[in-house]
Image (spheres, rainbow, N blue to C red):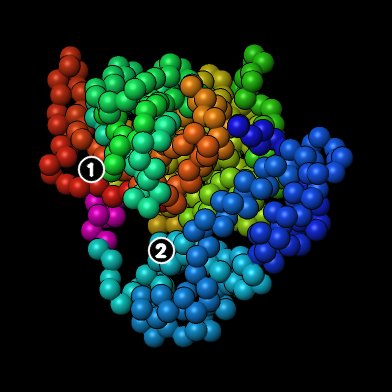
Amino acid sequence: MPLDLSYLSIPLPEEVVRIKQYGDFQGAAKVIDHLLERKIPFALKKRLEIEKEIIKMIGINEYPFSVNEAIHQMREAFEQFESKELDQLMEESLVDWIYIGGEPHFQRRFLLNLVKTQPAYAERLIKKEDSETDQLRKIELTENIRLMKENGHRKVKIHIRSSIKIKKEHERIGEQVKVHLPVPRNAQQISEIKILKHSEADKVTTSPEDSYQRTVCFETRLKENEEFFVEYEYVNEVHYIELDALKAEKAKEEMSDLEEQLPHIRFTPYLQSILDEVLDGETNAVIQARKIYDFITTNVKYSFMREYFTIDNISEYAAVNLKGDCGVQAILFITLCRMAGIPAKWQSGLYVSQYYTGCHDWAQFYVEPYGWIFADLSFGGGAYAAGDIERWNYYFGNLDIFRMPANDRIQEEFIPAKLHVRADPIDNQRGEWEYGDQGIPYAYLEVKQELISMKEIWGEGEQKELFRKSQLDDSAEKVL
């Protein structure tokens, strides 16, 4: 049954909050059940129904490590680690943790997050990570900027294989399953979309190219060790834009991408105070958007996130905690732009290159006479942190060629619709799986995205192969 996430904006009763914060999720669920048996306002009822699902998700492998287990991992990972360091990291909000049964427990990727976001800890690794791939990625991005500026655009044909399967211990052989995998949608930079091959199933449905969250859906009875996959190709063409604030005007026609979209695109008093401070009276649309971009990329630090479904208001979370991953930063940018009267919207899917293939989110905003323009907040923030000012400036207004957009809006239903609660009801980059009686969380699934080939297209159809899969295997972590 789909959930109306707008009800996340309704406050929870204090008894539920108190028990949940202590980490007694079963107790919180019991209190919710008692409340649902009473005659309560409809909006509160819907909020409590959502909270029951959130509690389930938090309890499934999101925060698995106790203090002792976290200390043990850090001693094995870092040179000269002392247990008191964990207390300091908690005080400085550099690790994500919650109470479970009154005791701190740490998010499943807390260690990886430290290595990725804290250079001092990366330097102290006992087993140093190979940074060669990261360096090659940065070189690739720098080369993309050079070519974009020299030629004004780039055009590539990309071939991807995406797959999903359920872990062995959660396999229910012979039962009916419904599986969705994301595929490219008809976006402004995308053309010539082709579904090349896919898994066999009793029923296979590919949603229309203009679906807001486009998928191919498999409905069948599950076989042992069954993997569902889809291969597709598309052409991605991006044009370089040099924004001129003197030419800029706000949208002349009424547009839909200016409104709140509860619960995550919400015009709160706190966000209004931030916007007033950031804009400082500025009225030019391009300069306003750039000020918002600068605020986020220089103040909101990249951090891996728990599942978005467990956050009440993503934009305010980012602005209060000053941390978040690519999607959290993009939603904050979209919200602040809309509050400033600048149409803004979501785009997401995959970042796809020979050195990395995985989930990624970015934003678009609308300014006359340029139309829809891109902004990649996490790529911009990463460039700023690395001291690469050219790359920081580039990602305000421009994208690279290494993208597969599957989603154009958050909180949209699939075609055909998923019957049970989605693992991610906000966005879709990994896919979704459900049995006849329940949806399945990502902790129970194995998801993989692979770049098969990428060819650059020049002039009258001349093609240059940039990558073919036999050359290199991909990774599958969230992009920085």
| Distance in Å between CA atoms under marks 1 and 2 | 22 Å
Is residue 156 located in the magenta-colored stretch of the structure?
no
Q: Nearer the viewer, residue 441 or 316?
A: 441
Q: What are the residue bounds of the magenta stretch?
A: 131-138
**Residue type at mark 2?**
Leu
Left or right: residue 7 compared with residue 54: right
Residue 318 visible from this viewpoint: no
Disc sitting over residue 354 in the figure: 1
Residue displayed at 27% across by 61% down: 131
**Above/below status of 259 relative to 226:** above
The spot of residue 75 in percent (x, y) is 40, 81
Disc sitting over residue 112 in the figure: 2
Q: Nearer the viewer, residue 402 or 82?
A: 82
**Residue type at mark 1?**
Gln
Disc sitting over residue 432 in the figure: none
In the displayed image of the protein, which residue is found farthest to the front? 174
Is residue 136 located in the magenta-colored stretch of the structure?
yes
Q: Nearer the viewer, mark 1 or mark 2?
A: 2
In the displayed image of the protein, which residue is found farthest to the left? 470
The spot of residue 15 in percent (x, y) is 80, 58
Residue 173 visible from this viewpoint: yes
Residue 114 picture quarter: bottom left
Determine crowd level at label 1: few under 14, some 14-19, many 20+ residues with C-alpha closer than 10 A.
many
The spot of residue 404 in percent (x, y) is 36, 31
